């Protein structure tokens, strides 16, 4: 209890509360702009935290993540364009509601159920993280290697339409992280004799390149082709749903909260899947399923509850096992590590106060979402009117500031440019970028744990197959790859442009 | 370029990358002593080999699909049109120039120059007010927020530095 009190004291300072508020605002703004996901927001917000104390820094990151997940609903409801992939299902009934002149109640309901879903998942997260950590703390190098391999298999399989392309992307990410000085033997690897390459490719630089630079290229290319997007939105206010409406849908909200939390806890699944599953669930169990797609409020409640419940779910494997479920949480992971917090089984032993701080920051972020979205909806309406090409100029400068400030190195700007252009080219040929980032995040752990396990066992491979836990994770990895192959064979359909993010 | 041709080309590029990667790994990274010492070469070599196998598998699957589709008229893929390449090249060189200029003239001057160039050359904006507002507003805003408020070190130039 003392530690929780310490965390509360640290997390409830004006600076820490302000940081959560700022992060939530950044997330809401980025999330509400179609094409500009909160993954980009996180990559650009991370350098802002470098000069901050740990608790406010975590507050900004979590605020951006949670705000971004919620912000997508604004453009989904008002324009019929999802601000983030997670809000794609909200379009189905949210936009018809706007056309019927019911945008205010759709937005108000989305905000309220988003907060309910998010807070539900926070409670599940608080119970689960400690429990999973206690089990995972007993893992040795072989088990951790198997666990990370399982995480990789899940993510690569679910990253895009083609498992083969997902695997190629995952391997590319793993390869990038081998560049630089080897952590165990201190040998130069793939440095081509240059000093700058010895420091390796910084994860954050790569993330900015992978997610922000392709957005800039795409926007400038569209502008060059004369494709101008005018987001014609009118001023409006948010109308809160009545208690009667929430009461009638309480069972639906509970179901969708559970769906979102469970899906979120599975690495690689993420918001879009949770939202569509919840939407489908709501329609399937509705007494009037024919109303769905024509402006049914349940069609907004279900996906918005679920996609926000994902936030707590994804933080369970992130905090307890150190496995990020999507690119956004991969950036949160990198940010936590920059500030000396290493998510994983030992997290509670090393940084218990900060973990409680994370819980408080998540709860605060939902309070800010309520305040900012209910009070400041006009701001988001104005944001949607900013021409995307001008926004891209701002993002270009932010990318350079972010890449440079990580290590005060101009070489990192060049690295970001190369990675960004290559990422765009890969996306053009249908190779998704999500597995690349996961490969980069999990790669060093995968290699180091494998080599440590082999050293511990004197080179005997039996360390991997005599551990039931390792075998379980290997089995799960094989199962995921098998299922993905099977569904890939069944649903062979061409995909020309890879998903940039599942966030 | 139609999608299948594009896939075949990307398969060939990835396979070439894998072969080059493996050759360079073998040539430049020492192997482990064997047994318990896995060594620094093992993982990069394994990954290069994996990429090669996956790229080959991808290439073969696309070649078979091409044969299957030969009789059919495949619609040109709208997204595969090379119209984005000028934007891609411009952004790439702009970022390289930005980095170089930051080293020589510092963050403030480099940012102002890059923003103005982007507005005029890439966006072909002809509004002096918008160009001036974006150039000075963005440069000053970033300098103020990052350099002064957040105390994040911004690049200083070797030739000249402002701010």
Image: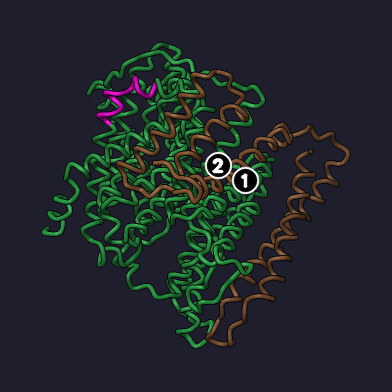
Chain colours: A green, B brown
Residue highlighted by disc 1: A421
Subunit ID for the residue under disc 1: A
What residue sits 38% from the left and 22% below the top?
A297
Magenta region, mostly helix, strand or loop?
Answer: helix
Mark positioned earlier in the residue sequence (1 or 2):
2
What residue sits 59% from the left and 71% below the top?
A189
What residue sits 38% from the left and 50% below the top?
B153
Q: Is residue A161 above or below residue A185?
A: above
Q: Name the residue nearer the viewer: A304 or A439.
A: A439
Q: Position of residue A112 (x, y in %)?
A: 29, 29
**Dots 1 and 2: beta carbons under 8 Å?**
yes
Residue A29 in view: yes
Residue occupying the far top of the picture? A101
Residue range highlighted in magenta? A370-381
Q: Quadrant of residue A275?
A: top left
Q: Name the residue nearer the viewer: A260 or A2.
A: A2
Magenta stretch: residue A374 in it?
yes
The mark found on residue A213 in the picture is 2
């Amino acid at each position: 209890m003392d530690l929780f009190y310490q965390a509360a004291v640290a997390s409830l300072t004006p600076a820490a509360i302000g940081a959560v508020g700022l992060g939530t605002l950044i997330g809401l703004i980025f999330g509400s702009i179609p094409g500009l996901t909160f993954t980009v927001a996180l990559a650009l917000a991370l350098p802002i935290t470098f000069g901050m104390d740990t608790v406010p820094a975590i507050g900004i990151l979590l605020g951006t993540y949670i705000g971004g997940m919620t912000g997508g609903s604004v453009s989904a409801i008002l324009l019929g364009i999802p601000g983030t992939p997670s809000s794609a299902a909200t379009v189905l009934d949210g936009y018809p509601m706007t056309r019927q002149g019911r945008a205010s109640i759709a937005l108000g309901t989305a905000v309220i159920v988003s907060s309910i879903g998010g807070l539900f998942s926070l409670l599940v997260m608080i119970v689960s993280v400690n429990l999973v950590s206690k089990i995972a703390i007993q893992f040795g190098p072989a088990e951790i290697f198997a666990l990370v391999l399982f995480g990789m298999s899940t993510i690569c399989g679910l990253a895009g339409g083609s498992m083969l392309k997902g695997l190629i992307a995952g391997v590319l990410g793993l390869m990038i992280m081998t560049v630089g000085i080897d952590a165990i033997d201190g040998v130069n690897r793939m440095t081509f004799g240059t000093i700058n390459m010895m420091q390796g490719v910084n994860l954050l630089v790569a993330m900015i390149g992978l997610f922000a630079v392709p957005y800039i290229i795409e926007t400038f290319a569209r502008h060059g082709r004369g494709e101008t997007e005018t987001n014609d939105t009118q001023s409006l206010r948010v109308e809160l749903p009545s208690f009667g409406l929430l009461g009638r849908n309480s069972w639906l909200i509970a179901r969708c909260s559970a769906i979102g939390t469970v899906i979120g806890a599975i690495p690689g699944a993420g918001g879009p899947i949770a939202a569509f599953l919840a939407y489908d669930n709501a329609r399937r169990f509705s007494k009037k399923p024919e109303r769905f797609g024509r402006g049914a409020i349940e069609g907004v409640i279900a996906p918005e509850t679920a996609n926000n419940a994902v936030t707590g779910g994804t933080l369970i494997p992130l905090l307890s096992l150190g496995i990020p479920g999507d690119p956004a949480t991969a950036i949160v992971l990198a940010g936590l590590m920059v500030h000396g917090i290493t998510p994983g089984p030992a997290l509670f032993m090393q940084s218990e106060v900060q973990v409680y701080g994370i819980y408080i920051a998540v709860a605060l972020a939902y309070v800010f979402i309520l305040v900012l979205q209910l009070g400041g909806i006009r701001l988001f309406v104005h944001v949607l009117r900013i021409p995307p090409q001008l926004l891209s100029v701002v993002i270009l400068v932010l990318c350079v500031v972010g890449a440079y400030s990580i290590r005060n190195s101009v070489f990192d700007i060049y690295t970001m440019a190369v990675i960004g252009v290559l990422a765009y080219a890969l996306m053009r040929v249908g190779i998704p970028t999500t597995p690349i980032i996961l490969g980069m995040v999990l790669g060093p752990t995968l290699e180091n744990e494998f080599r440590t396990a082999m050293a511990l066992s004197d080179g005997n491979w039996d360390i991997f197959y005599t551990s039931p836990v390792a075998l379980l994770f290997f089995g799960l990895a094989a199962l995921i790859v098998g299922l993905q192959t099977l569904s890939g064979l069944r649903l062979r359909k061409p995909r020309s442009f890879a998903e940039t993010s599942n966030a | 370029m139609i999608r299948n041709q594009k896939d075949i080309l990307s398969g060939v590029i990835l396979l070439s990358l894998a072969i080059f990667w493996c050759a360079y790994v073998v040539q430049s990274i020492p192997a482990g002593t064997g047994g318990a010492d896995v060594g620094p070469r093992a993982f990069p070599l394994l990954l290069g080999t994996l990429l090669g196998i996956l790229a080959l598998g991808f290439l073969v699957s696309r070649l078979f699909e091409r044969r299957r589709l030969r009789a059919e008229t495949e619609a040109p893929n709208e997204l595969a049109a090379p119209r984005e390449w000028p934007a891609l090249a411009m952004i790439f060189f702009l970022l390289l120039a930005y980095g170089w200029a930051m080293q020589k003239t510092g963050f403030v001057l480099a940012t102002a120059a890059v923003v103005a160039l982007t507005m005029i050359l890439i966006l072909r904006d002809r509004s002096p007010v918008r160009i001036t507002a974006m150039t000075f507003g963005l440069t000053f805003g970033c300098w103020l927020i990052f350099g002064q408020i957040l105390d994040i070190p911004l690049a200083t130039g070797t030739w000249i530095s402002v701010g």
